[in-house]
Image (cartoon, rainbow, N blue to C red):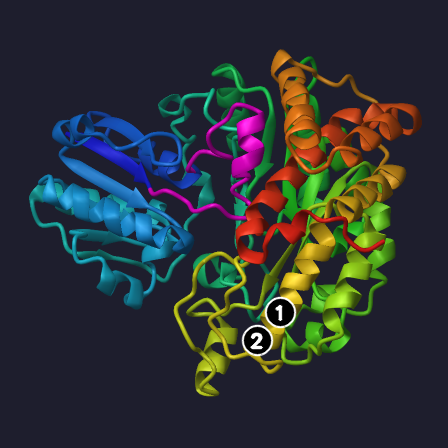
Amino acid sequence: MNALLVYPRSPETFWSLTHALRLINRKAASPPLGLLTVAAMLPSDWNLRLVDLNVRDMTDEDLAWADYALVSGMIVQRDSALDVAARCKSAGLTVVAGGPLFASEEERARFGDVDHFVLNEAELTLPPFLEDLERGEARRLYRTDEFADMSVSPVPRWDLVDPREYASRGVQFSRGCPNDCEFCAVTQLFGHRWRKKTVAQVIAELDCLYGVGWRGVVPFVDDNFNAMGRYLRNELLPALIEWRRGKRGVSFSAQVTMELADDTELLELMVRAGFDTVFIGIETMDEANLAECHKKQNRNRDLLADIKRIQRAGLQVQAGFIVGFDNDTPSVFARMAEFIQKSGIVTAMVGLLQAPAGTALYDRLDREGRIRVDLSGDNSDGTTNIVPRMGLESLQAGYGDLLRDLYAPRNYYRRVRTFLREYRPPSVNVHITPSHVLAAVRSLYHLSVAGRERWEYPGLLFWTLFRRPRTLPVAVALAIYGYHYRKCFEPLYGASVSGPGRS
């Protein structure tokens, strides 16, 4: 049996890092971890071929070789997935689909070219599909309301990936989140109960990655990495510290909650284990909005002080923000810009409030008649599927002004300096490779010679060399990210996003 594992093309988004990847000679940010995990669950006598359309095209030779096409994707990949299913079906392949894109009935109705939907967690729904397929009795739909025991989840098939194509490799240690944010689809997909792999499983995955030659960042793609701090302190983080002894070039990142700022021991262990970046869903600084969206873990906190505490511990804070809550007024845009500048959160993903189908927010707004269009799946493209209290035109206009303010070079580079003043990098040897040096040279040309940042970028480099020399690789990386953000936003809000910005 020959099977194509097809990952649809992603549009250019905040997180696609398309323009930054060109400077470091990579084609995509990360491989499709879900498909690679599914690949490890397929029969050993199947011949597998990964086709990530973000890296290469699906050729006629691929289609002629294959019997099956297994397609997975996110909502933002909808258009590409429709094209993939149609092309595979017309070539005579049996099309099997799974993943968040296909989870709702509305989405499945669009995909008439799909023969079988294998939904929810593959550890539970893939085995019965394969058994029925072997008997020639495969049904169209396989789904479950149960959640998998992650201790049976296999090591992903990293051998199917070209290590030269991607900027990172991911590990999924846990699923589920005990929180109940109104706008979030995580608990709909993975439930409230926090489930984890064993430490031995995580180490086996890292050994596999290291064995195939990966040296770089390994994001823990969990939605709430620090949900069980005691387990991290006592088991996982000590094991990661031990694993990294004698190894160079591997670092970690994770998505955490602001409660991490309260746990000094956990912060210290994460840095010792090799974590250098965390993403936090801050969403809003307004207490009324936090109550509205049930973001209780961020309420009654000094958010600015919490961020500084995490930065001083040795972790860069990236964060997500949302505008368009019912309690937001036009003043929210200036207040958010001021907060982000003061915080030194360089990578600030600000999006309009959106309501994914199946969330509590979607159900509430649907009852109020405030769901207006399909969800785009890209929460920073300036669209929303809801009718905001503020008025759509006012919301989008204020959002455009906010992005122009945040990502104008002058303000962006000031934010980098604010972060670097607080940041205390761990005392470890930085693993500099020829590709790092080449990226720095390319960035200097694209940002300062060919680009509009003729003075800002060199100024940052000189400032860092004299004031914070150990953070120079971080400064270069952040400048490259900023280049992508500006290029990403320009089609939406005009070239003025690259203008001087307010002081």
- Examine the structure image and report whether residue 115 is included in the region drawn in magenta: no
In the image, 7 versus 156, the foreground residue is 7
Which three-letter amino acid code belongs to the residue tagged 2? Glu
> Disc number at residue 290?
none
Label 1 – label 2 distance at C-alpha: 6 Å
Quarter-of-image position of residue 220:
top right
Looking at the image, residue 447 lies above or below residue 389: above
Q: Secondary structure at mark 2?
A: helix
Residue drawn at point x = 69 percent, y = 43 percent: 278
What label sits on residue 393 in the rendered view? 2
Q: Are marks 1 and 2 in contact (CB under 8 Å)?
A: yes
Which residue matches tag 1?
397
Which residue sits furthest right? Answer: 467
Give the magenta-colored segment's residue range: 8-32
Q: Secondary structure at mark 1?
A: helix
Q: Nearer the viewer, residue 202 or 164?
A: 164
| Relative image position of residue 286 (x, y in whole percent) | 76, 72
Q: Amino acid at mark 1?
A: Ala
**Residue 89: x %, y % from top left:** 13, 45
**Count of marks placed on residues:** 2
Image location (x, y in percent) of residue 485: 62, 45
Q: Main secondary structure of the magenta part?
A: loop
Which of the 4 image quarters holds residue 389? Answer: bottom right
In the image, residue 244 above or below residue 82: above
